Image (cartoon, grey):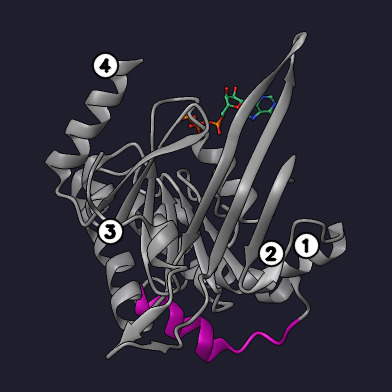
Amino acid sequence: MTTAPNPSTTATAPLRVNGRPVDRPPPAVELREVTRHYPASGSTVRALDGVTIAFPTGSWTAVMGPSGSGKSTLLHCAAGLDRVSAGRVLLAGRDITTASDNDLTELRRDTIGFVFQNFNLIGSLTAEQNVALPLKLSGARVPRARIRQTLESVGLGDRLRHRPRELSGGQQQRVAIARAMVTAPAVLFADEPTGALDSTSARTVLGLLRSMVDTTAQTIVMVTHDPVAAASADAVVFLSDGRITDVLSRPSAREVADRLAGMEADR
Ligand SMILES: Nc1ncnc2c1ncn2[C@@H]1O[C@H](COP(=O)(O)OP(=O)(O)OP(=O)(O)O)[C@@H](O)[C@H]1O
């Protein structure tokens, strides 16, 4: 095991300066003893098995592990897209474990942003219209200046009227990030955000995510298979068979790759 600090402990232990406890923001997302099982022909799959972790506000955490280890399930439970079988989930300071479907829909709309591997943009809409969509759907006013500013912040101020097919993969992913960020979510969840990109575009997207964390204290939780992407995060959490087996703080891509290779060899 690594000696690197575990986000679950660093986030919850009281911070002390000169022996005195100091206030710090609560974690943006917290899972406490979360179990998620699914029925499977005559038995049960434990996709998550007693996971306790806190994702500190303003930090970027990568979640890694072999196929089927529970990464997507963790992301979906943390984002309120899936219900837990046992345990508790706290999102932006609210216990969402038993929230009603309506409350969850509202919370997802106002509190989280989601970025997917395949961008999930609407092909018939321009970049500007895609970014405006979450505000439109929530019935909010859509201030054009804010849409433009958000697209400018991802380096696409000159692509407002372009449709997805007129943009490169990296540009499409940046539109998707702008769409996720336009509501100023407490947490940005990303599922393989660089999985469909070439290495240059991936680097641009990772740089953008990094600057969001460094300049606006955005909280990001990202599932990835890519050691280079994981090494851009502040911490890397490793899952195996639904359990957290390891946490690395600010590892290099080589350290991440070695740890993953070790996990595959142990299987
Ligand atoms: N809706 C579901 N119904 C039944 N089993 C499920 C469901 N979702 C996930 N599982 C099972 O839970 C386990 C964890 O799945 P999950 O998708 O979280 O893994 P993962 O680490 O994200 O995998 P991958 O890297 O291949 O995407 C797997 O054994 C999977 O088959």
**Judging from the image, what secondary structure is the residue with disc 3 in?**
helix
Residue 60: quarter of image = bottom left
Mark 1 touching mark 2, by CB under 8 A? Answer: yes
Residue 136 lies, in percent from the top left, at 71, 75
**Mark pair 3, 2: CA separation:** 24 Å
Q: Residues within 10 Å of mark 1 (few under 14, many from 20)?
A: some
Examine the structure image and report whether residue 237 is included in the region drawn in magenta. no
Q: Amino acid at mark 3?
A: Leu
Between disc 2 and disc 4, whose residue precedes? Answer: 2
Give amino acid for label 4: Ala
Q: Which residues are magenta?
A: 140-155
Whether residue 242 sits left or right of residue 63 in the image: it is right
The residue indicated by pointer 1 is 105
The residue depicted at 49 percent of the width and 60 percent of the height is 54
Whether pointer 3 and pointer 2 mark residues with C-beta atoms closer than 8 Å, the reply is no
Is residue 190 in view? yes
- Quadrant location of the N terminus? top left
Q: Which residue is mark 2?
A: 108
Is any atom of residue 82 visible in this view? no
Q: Report which residue position mark 4 lands on.
A: 265
Along the line of sight, the residue nearer the viewer: 262 or 198: 262
Q: Amino acid at mark 1?
A: Thr
Q: Nearer the viewer, mark 2 or mark 4?
A: 4
Q: Is residue 85 left or right of residue 226?
A: right
Cα separation between marks 1 and 2 = 5 Å
Residue 20: x %, y % from top left: 37, 90
Q: According to the image, label 3 marks what residue?
A: 206
